Amino acid sequence: MSVRRRAAALAFTAVLCGAAAPAAVAAPSPSPSSSAPDLPEGLYGTKDPTYDGVWRQSLAFLAQKIELVTPATKSVDWLVGQQCDSGAFASYRDASRPCDDKTVADTNATAAAVQAVVELGVHREVVDNGVAWLKSVQNDDGGWGYNPGSPSDANSTAVVNGALARAGVPLADLTKAGGKTPYTALQTFALPCGGEDGGAFAYQPDKTGKLAANADATAAAVLGSMGKGMAAGNYNAVKAPVCTKGDGLTPEQSAQNGASYLAKALAGKGHLDLPPMPGAEESDPQPDFGNTADAVVALAAAGHKDAAADSVAYLAKHAQGWAKEGGPAATAQLVLAAHATGADARDFGGVDLVRQLNATGPAPAATAVPSPTATTPSKPADTSSDDEGLGLWWIIGIGLAFGAGIGFLLSGRRKNQQL
């Protein structure tokens, strides 16, 4: 889910806190304030975390770990402390108070946090509790909505799929009445091949049941249909994506159909467009850097990083200002896109995205340079640390990995099992 869509969705969710049954989140909403005083220690970013605190922290950890950076323990402790006893995460909460019936549980924040903690390799209890809660709020159609009880949508179902798969849960076994699974739930949002938008996924059907192509939802659904998390490894390119017609498609075929749509959407300009906001003076569509980065990751994960090459070049040339202003989540999106396509996140259009991301939070416990996907010879690891405990074990692990000449293979653990 893009940073922009997430902020809007969470702001709208806040309005629904007192409602008995949350509605689908798809309306424009006010943006968070530009800054927030008294931010908790360990939190990444300087802007108001009300709508995206857990999300941006989780994306930051995913991007750091895929680039062999270990965050400070106090940053990890902050994320762990956001979890409720139920196993759910809210978008952000005051952890000095226990969760209660006014705490708005968030499937997206929970799924992102589970993915991040899995990659960190610590606090398995957080993962297990998060997984148990996510399974408990699965809708009857096999999918998930933004909040428990809300209608399923492609983005939420996809990010939960990625979290459960990364945690080792066989998605095909999460069956509801009629054989409905997380995979079949995603396929209900897929547009059939043929026509301009063939192969795309919708966010949700409209009131009449009609599906409208949504690039953001498509990028998420490609990953979710393959049971992959947001931190995708560097995959080799295969033949060009094609859209397979017919009923009874496999989840993999649906994912490839989505990839074919994304490849066509990115062709030419190399980026997706962001429709103008209501009332904006600028009426022309602007580049949508966040969703473009997500589309790049989805294409690469589906085996088509060659189809994303022009988009990676476009992001490297034009997205630096957006990422710096957008904070940790935006910078993390670029790091993930760079890594998934074999680009050097530490020299992405002349910008060291990893350093930029690290600077948005407490100093990491340990780092490794250069990027694990870079082609230059490896340099000794920077073991400077403000956190001796976590840093020590990371140093031992990385020392063994580089000593065996398999530093790059560490990124391969991000390849999720194909279910």
Image (spheres, grey):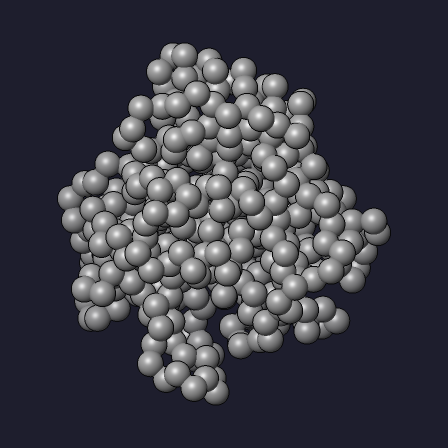
Q: Is residue 276 visible?
A: yes
In the displayed structure, 387 sits above or below 44; it is: above
Residue lying at the far front of the rendered structure: 350
> Dividing the picture into quarters, in which one does residue 37 lie?
bottom right
Q: Is residue 211 visible?
A: no
Residue lying at the far left of the rendered structure: 239
Whole-percent x and y of residue 16? 68, 72
Whole-percent x and y of residue 299? 29, 49
Left or right of 344 in this view: 129: right
The residue shown at (15%, 44%) is 239
The residue shown at (20%, 46%) is 306
The residue shown at (55%, 23%) is 383
Left or right of 13 in this view: 407: left
Left or right of 2 in this view: 52: right
Left or right of 185 in this view: 32: right
> Dividing the picture into quarters, in which one does residue 236 lie?
top left
Count of marks overlaid on the render: 0
In the displayed structure, 51 sits above or below 393; it is: below
Whole-percent x and y of residue 158? 46, 52
Residue lying at the far right of the rendered structure: 97
The residue shown at (33%, 39%) is 344
